[in-house]
Image: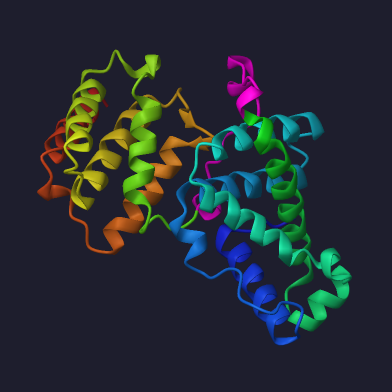
Amino acid sequence: MSAVSYNDVVESLLKLHKCYRVQGFLDMDIINRVDFFSKPRAALALAAMLWVINLAKRNIIGYSDIVAIERRIASFLVKSDASEIEFLKKLLELTPSRLGLDITSVSRRCMVDHQKLVDVIKLLNLIKEVISLAPIANQMQISESQKKSRTPCLNDDEMLPSTNAIADTLTKMIYSELENMKKLLDDPYFIHVMDIMGKKIKMGQLKPSDIVAFSLVILAILRYRKEMQVCIEPGIDVEALCRKIYNDLIYTGADPTTSDIYALYQELSMRSIIRK
């Protein structure tokens, strides 16, 4: 079965929203396109849930894995602003069954591809389950064994949202999660770039050029240590997320060479060439 991307889901949900408004099922707008790309934790939660759906379609994970991931996503979401969870709750109002509609009729009436609609409904069901766990998320202990689950972390760029509007927040989240990453603390380049980024974040001086340069350094370190996969909550591969941030910001004109962090990337690149 083909995978459904983050943008596929966004387009399908916006089509449903517009269709429901035109046909009188909704009496006011409840979401807009910006919502999907401006709420960092909600966006990553949606991406992680979408990843779960794609893994389940390929029979890579089972029910117990899905439940474990739902708990991780719920714990991740409770740290977000209330407006982010509220946005996810609003998405549930687009569930066809809430309006007494079936998948086939909605697909036809709203001109949404049937298979994509099936995946969207699976996503909405996951959102509902995750939100139901949110009130008790603080009491749920996520063990180290659960964090090191056999379930692969999201490593497909197509599953991730555009990061243009949230790159700053995502980078701070990556920094925070990597800060105590014992597996990398023996790398002097990692220690150095974390020290520089920590100072920039503390002083509020983080620029797009710093973000893309930081992404480059982290990518270089992880590619150099190919045996290691580093994931951040709620199950996102750091390499994939840094790659997405880098590509998105470079496309909008960010220049890593103007950051003092870029010299570290050049040193790393030279080290890789020498050791080949």
Residue at image position (30%, 57%) is 249
Q: Is residue 170 left or right of residue 211?
A: right
**Which quadrant holds residue 179?**
top left
Position above or below: 148 against 114:
above
Q: Where is residue 18 in the image (x, y as percent from the top left)?
A: 65, 80
- Figure colour scheme: rainbow
Residue at image position (26%, 45%) is 211
Q: Main secondary structure of the magenta part?
A: loop
Viewer-side residue, 213 vs 176: 176
Viewer-side residue, 75 vs 67: 75
Q: Is residue 171 left or right of residue 42?
A: left
Asked if residue 158 lies in the magenta stretch, the reply is yes
Q: Where is residue 66 in the image (x, y as percent from the top left)?
A: 74, 35
Position above or below: 187 against 25:
above
How many discs mark residues in the rendered view? 0
Which image quadrant: the C terminus? top left
The magenta stretch spans which residues? 138-160
Position above or below: 164 against 242:
below
Q: In this view, does 199 lie to the left or right of 25?
A: left
Instruction: Tell me, yes or no, if residue 260 can be seen here.
Output: yes
Instruction: Tell me, yes or no, if residue 149 can be seen here.
Output: no
Q: In this view, does 174 lie to the left or right of 85?
A: left
**Which quadrant holds residue 228?**
top left
Q: Position of residue 118 (x, y in %)?
A: 79, 61
Which image quadrant: the N terminus? bottom right
**Which quadrant holds residue 67?**
top right
Position above or below: 31 against 244:
below
Q: Position of residue 242 (x, y in %)?
A: 37, 43
Asked if residue 165 lies in the magenta stretch, the reply is no
Residue at image position (78%, 40%) is 59
Residue at image position (17%, 31%) is 199
